[in-house]
Image (spheres, helix red, strand yellow):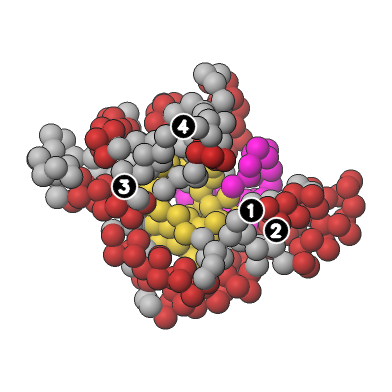
């Protein structure tokens, strides 16, 4: 075991992991965290806490992760390189570990121009691959980047993100291979709607033997409406939504759109479970956390294993 987290134990034992996601409040209201966490509890193995996603100021991922740990849930702290230099990054990793957090997801972060402080100064002292290398150095060689020995090792289970659909498509697996070489333990992908293309991506992953070196969790997000499906298709960079999905959501009508969105999500999970090299799902409900239990249950993924 590298970190001994619940997520690591499930993946290492060959189990099919389920992770969820929690967006912190845009303020200090802890009840928002408690409400979302109660909907995820028992349905997922670990909960990603986003780090000022889309560059909008929210409660810190470290603080929310610590609150989840106190509630008996396992957190995966997301950390972006946008807002911190290497000194702050390493300091925050020490602090997060001290507060009980054992999983970290290393991300570059959305550019600040997309958020509510478009004139803020980006940092990007490190990129996501360098952040993976930094956490691995701290964990495995017990050193900070400057070379000093660490007093108490932050034994983190190291994750990163991958987008199988961004252009150029053939480069996506090369990018993944770089993260594997940097020392990542698990990968969570962008939302998947184009299952045929994702299967082609996974074939390239298997051709390089990467599925035997890293745990891949496929990203899924239930659709609430045909408008959401169209937005995903037309406005979200690196996202591909096939026309047949749009047609299904439109045909369901406004009254049954959410039900059809859940049906599509469950079908996707059942198909993902059959793909060699997919070791779990990362379920991003996006403010629809009360749908998580139904999705996981219908997909045959309950009860979650106790390890």
Q: Which residue matches tag 4?
A: 120
The magenta span reads 284-307
Picture quadrant where residue 29 is located: top right
Label 2, label 3: how many angstroms apart (C-alpha)? 31 Å
Q: Is residue 41 left or right of residue 181?
A: right
Label tally: 4
Element at badge 2?
helix
Specify which label sits upstream in the sequence, 3 or 4. 4
Q: Is residue 62 left or right of residue 201?
A: left
Label 3 Cα crowd, 10 Å radius (few <14 / some 14-19 / many 20+): some
Label 1, label 4: how many angstroms apart (C-alpha)? 22 Å
Q: Which residue matches tag 3?
A: 126
Residue 230 pos. (x, y %):
76, 55
Residue 89 pos. (x, y %):
30, 37
Query: Which dot, 2 or 3, sits closer to the camera?
Result: 3
Residue 27 pos. (x, y %):
54, 21
Label 1, label 2: how many angstroms apart (C-alpha)? 7 Å
Element at badge 1?
loop
Label 3, label 1: how many angstroms apart (C-alpha)? 25 Å
Specify which label sits upstream in the sequence, 3 or 1. 3
CB under 8 Å between discs 2 and 3: no
Residue 161 magenta-highlighted? no
Label 1 Cα crowd, 10 Å radius (few <14 / some 14-19 / many 20+): few
């Amino acid at each position: 075991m590298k970190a001994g987290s619940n997520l690591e134990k499930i993946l290492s034992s060959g189990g099919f992991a389920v992770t969820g996601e929690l967006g912190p409040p845009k303020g200090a209201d802890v009840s928002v965290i408690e409400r979302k966490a109660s909907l995820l509890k028992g349905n997922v193995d670990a909960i990603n806490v986003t780090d000022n996603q889309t560059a909008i100021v929210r409660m810190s991922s470290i603080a929310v992760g610590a609150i989840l740990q106190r509630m008996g849930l396992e957190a995966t702290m997301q950390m972006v390189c946008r807002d911190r230099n290497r000194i702050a990054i390493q300091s925050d990793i020490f602090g997060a570990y001290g507060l009980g957090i054992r999983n970290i997801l290393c991300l570059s972060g959305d550019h600040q121009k997309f958020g509510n402080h478009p004139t803020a100064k980006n940092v990007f002292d490190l990129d996501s691959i360098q952040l993976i290398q930094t956490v691995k150095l701290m964990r495995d060689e017990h050193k900070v980047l400057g070379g000093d020995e660490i007093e108490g090792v932050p034994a983190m289970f190291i994750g990163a993100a991958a987008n199988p659909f961004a252009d150029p498509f053939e480069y996506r697996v090369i990018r993944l291979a770089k993260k594997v070489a940097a020392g990542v333990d698990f990968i969570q992908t962008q939302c998947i709607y184009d299952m045929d293309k994702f299967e082609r991506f996974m074939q390239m992953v298997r051709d390089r033997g990467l599925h035997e070196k890293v745990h891949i969790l496929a990203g899924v997000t239930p659709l609430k409406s045909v408008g959401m499906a169209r937005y995903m298709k037309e406005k979200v960079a690196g996202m591909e939504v096939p026309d047949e999905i749009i047609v299904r959501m439109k045909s369901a009508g406004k009254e049954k759109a959410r039900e059809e969105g859940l049906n599509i999500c469950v079908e996707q999970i059942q198909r993902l479970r059959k793909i060699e090299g997919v070791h779990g799902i990362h379920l991003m409900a996006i403010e629809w956390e009360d749908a998580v239990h139904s999705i996981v249950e219908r997909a045959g993924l309950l009860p979650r294993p106790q390890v």
